[in-house]
Image: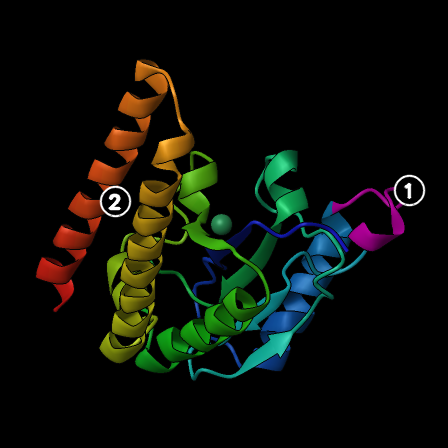
Amino acid sequence: MRAIKQIIIHHSASPQSMPLDNAVALFDRVHKQRLHPTSNWYWLHIAYHYVVSANGDYKKTRPIKEIGYHAGVRKVNIESVWICLVWNFEIETPTTAQYNTVKKLIRELQSLWDIEVLWHKNVKATACPGKNFDFRKLEEELYTQEEKKVAIQDIIKSNSELWDKVEKTKKYITGKDTMDLIDNVQHSLSELNKYLRTRWF
Ligand SMILES: [Zn+2]
């Protein structure tokens, strides 16, 4: 299995919202035409791993193990999973159902791999997925406040444990440079925990 590092959000820039099956069939046809038939076998069908229509329906259109291709940057293609939202978000606005489905897909993928979410414009000079796609809203609503708090609490606990562990190993350490570095790390851990407690609790 390839190493997945990113989920990339893309819009189809289609002038109309289309039913899911029509959109998938159209992309499949267009992508097949665009690609050279002697390319590797896995290139020969729809480039996206998921397609999400305006009513929130979605289809898994490409196995994750197959590299997608749309970034225009090969390194990115190799490491990413593509989610294509049907419609043109330079003009239209994604529907709540569409946001909800994308969130569900991202959560599923993030439960399997440690991956970040990007939009197409993060990896290539393009307007995709359009100015009306609200990336901040997506990011903020991806996990509930409660889920975020549990994760933050876990970080705080790990930081404290690491602080204690470092403290206990100090007696074995010699050399001012090393000790200074260790003090700095401990200071940073304390500061981070202080910040997280203030910000979240
Ligand atoms: Zn795109």
Reply yes or no: does residue 99 show up in magenta.
Answer: no
Could you tell me which quadrant the C terminus lies in? bottom left
> Residue drawn 48% across and 56% down?
10
- Residue type (three-letter) at the residue carrying disc 2: Leu
Q: Residues within 10 Å of mark 2 (few under 14, many from 20)?
A: some
Q: In the image, 28: left or right of 185?
A: right
Helix, strand or loop at label 2? It is helix
Task: Look at the image and name its color scheme.
Answer: rainbow
Where does the image place residue 164, in percent across and percent down from the top left? Answer: 31, 50
- First in sequence: mark 1 or mark 2? 1
Please name whichever residue, 148 or 156, is drawn nearer the observer in this view of the structure: 156
Q: What is the span of residues highlighted in magenta in the rendered image? A: 35-43
Q: In the image, 24: left or right of 17?
A: right
Task: Examine the rendered structure and indicate whether residue 14 appears above or below residue 147.
Answer: above
Where does the image place residue 172, in percent across and percent down from the top left? Answer: 42, 31
Q: Specify the farthest residue to the front.
A: 171
Reply yes or no: does residue 36 show up in magenta.
Answer: yes
Q: Which residue is mark 2?
A: 189
Q: Quadrant of residue 44?
A: bottom right
Q: Residues within 10 Å of mark 1 (few under 14, many from 20)?
A: few
Please name whichever residue, 109 or 62, is drawn nearer the observer in this view of the structure: 109
Q: Which residue is mark 1?
A: 38
- The secondary structure that dominates the magenta segment is loop
> Residue drawn 20% across and 53% down?
193
Please name whichever residue, 176 or 198, is drawn nearer the observer in this view of the structure: 176
Where does the image place residue 191, in percent across and percent down from the top left? Answer: 16, 44
Task: Examine the rendered structure and indicate whether residue 87 appears above or below residue 125.
Answer: below
> Residue drawn 32% across and 30% down?
182
- Residue type (three-letter) at the residue carrying disc 1: Thr
**Residue 41 visible:** yes
Where does the image place residue 59, in percent across and percent down from the top left? Answer: 62, 78
